[in-house]
Amino acid sequence: MERRSAIPVVFDTLVKWKTTAMLADEIYAICQRLIRGMPQMAVQVKRQHVENQDGEEIKIIPQNSDCAPVYIRPMADWIYVLLGRNTSEEIFIKWHKEQEALNRLEKIVRAAIEGSFSEDVWTHDGKIVKSLGIIKIDGSMRNIGGFRTFSNPFRRKERRHYDYAPYTKGISHTSCVVQIQ
């Protein structure tokens, strides 16, 4: 029986962890740049380790509940983005160059911050069974995400449309300090 070394596996895991950590740093910097200059307490950016999983999650949480929150989870080969109530988008780094993926992410987050995002959410018995986002990027409207779960196609689903407000709507512009935790 041939003995195999665990070193390549450990090295590969460390490389992926370092790459994901560096990607999280870049995403966090993008989020900070996008909210710079907003009034104090208009938005919070939180970065935290995800328990029982490798990696981190970056949350952009607006003070105004009429605005779309953004959750970002960088992985080794892709970036998972959740907007609003349930619209998700996966940006695959293998399909794009890393900088192109980060530029796409920045455009998506900027649109949510500026209030250029809306979504349709279908529920059945209080559970989300489908969602579809509409986002305005570079002057054109685009569908984004598209969540579906298995449900009885003959059961009636309730559809709700959400138009999200800009993060600065209803916020006093007397202070330009942003709280970052």
Image (cartoon, rainbow, N blue to C red):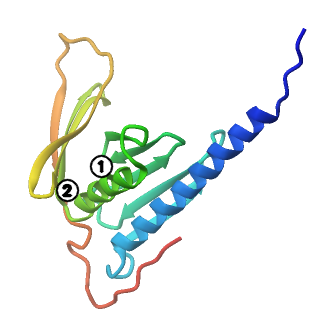
Badge number at residue 84: 1
**Quadrant where the image shows the N terminus:** top right
Please report contact status of discs 1 and 2: CB closer than 8 Å, yes or no: yes
Q: Which residue is mark 2?
A: 164
Q: Residue at x 24, y 34 (%)?
A: 131
Q: Determine whether 169 is above or below 12 in the image.
A: below
Percent across and percent down for residue 103 are 32, 57
* Left or right for 7, reference 18: right
Percent across and percent down for residue 50 are 60, 47
* Occupied quadrant, residue 178: bottom left
Percent across and percent down for residue 136 are 14, 53
Q: Residue at x 16, y 38 (%)?
A: 160
| C-alpha gap between disc 1 and disc 2 | 8 Å
Percent across and percent down for residue 79 are 43, 45
As rendered, which of 153 and 76 lies closer to the eye?
A: 76
* Left or right for 31, reference 158: right
The residue tagged with tag 2: helix, strand or loop?
A: loop
As rendered, which of 107 and 135 lies closer to the eye?
A: 107
Q: Determine whether 66 is above or below 81 in the image.
A: below
Instruction: Say which amino acid is labelled 1.
Output: Gly
Q: Determine whether 33 is above or below 113 in the image.
A: below
